[in-house]
Amino acid sequence: MVRSRAAVVAGAAELLLNDGPGAVTIDAVVQRTGVARSTIYRHFPTSTDVLRAAVEAVLPVSVPGESGDDDGERPNPTQLRDALRRRLRATADHLVGGAWTRALPALLELVARDPSLEEHRAQIVARHREPLLDLLRVVRDAGLLPADADLAVVADRLLGPLFYRRLVSGEPLTHELCDHLVDTVLTPGDPR
């Protein structure tokens, strides 16, 4: 039973990545996996449930980046700027090389099909955004951002251009862009 569920999820994930969210149908999963339709419906009552499982399988738990090493010493501003640059560069690299951006349209389609899944989408986004927010808290506490800075807005200013370039304009995601974005959000006058 566990094996058949895993086969269904793997097959649906392949369909999602290769052919897009519209290709993830019960019939297509049956064809790809050889798992009986009745077995699929035991695990997943609807094709939307199959697509949701495929999206979850494709999306990583988090974006690679800073491990959060903490030796107990307060990092200096240059170290924090560099840590923020590394985090943003890792996100950009992940968007270019990972399955995330191929799965994102499927996630948006899921929410469009079933608005009750908005909370699920919000949880996935939060899971990927929280490490950046954690780092931004440290950056703010070190005085590199105003004390009253809205960290969600700062994160949007950093991540928004990356997603726009990857999903809309097709312009390259470079490390230079990431460094520039970090420099534009940090308090003027700090060490560069």
Image (tube, rainbow, N blue to C red):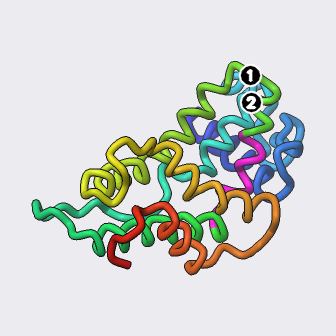
Predominant SS along the magenta part = helix
Residue 29 position in % (x across, y down): 81, 42
Q: Is residue 46 left or right of residue 145?
A: right
Q: Residue at x 75, y 39 (%)?
A: 108
For the residue labelled by badge 1, is the local secondary structure a helix, a strand or a loop? helix
Which disc is residue 115 wearing? 1
State the residue at coordinates (69%, 19%): 116
Q: Which amino acid, by three-letter code, is at mark 2?
A: Val
Residue closer to the observer: 33 or 82: 82
Q: Which residues are magenta?
A: 98-107
Q: Quadrant of residue 181?
A: bottom right
Up the image or down, 75 lies above or below 130; here it is below
Asked if the residue at tag 1 contacts the one at tag 2, i.e. Cβ–Cβ closer than 8 Å, the answer is yes
In this rendering, the answer to whether 56 lies above or below 95 is: above
> Quick check: 163 left or right of 79?
right
Identify the residue at the far front of this view. 189
Which residue is label 2 attached to?
Answer: 111
Amino acid type at circle 1 is Pro
Res. 173 image quadrant: bottom right
Q: Residue at x 33, y 76 (%)?
A: 191
Residue 167 magenta? no
Specify the quadrant that holds the N terminus. top right
In this rendering, the answer to whether 22 lies above or below 171 is: above
Name the spot of residue 5 as percent of width and height, x first. 63, 37
Dot 1, how many residues are within 10 Å of its Cα: few (below 14), some (14-19), or many (20+)? few
**Front-lying residue, 66 or 18:** 66
Residue that sits furthest to the left in the current view: 72
Q: Quadrant of residue 67?
A: bottom left
Residue at 35%, 55% (x, y): give it: 135
Left or right, 177 with reference to 104: left
Q: Position of residue 34 (x, y in %)?
A: 79, 44
Pinpoint residue 113: horizontal percent, then vertical percent. Answer: 82, 27
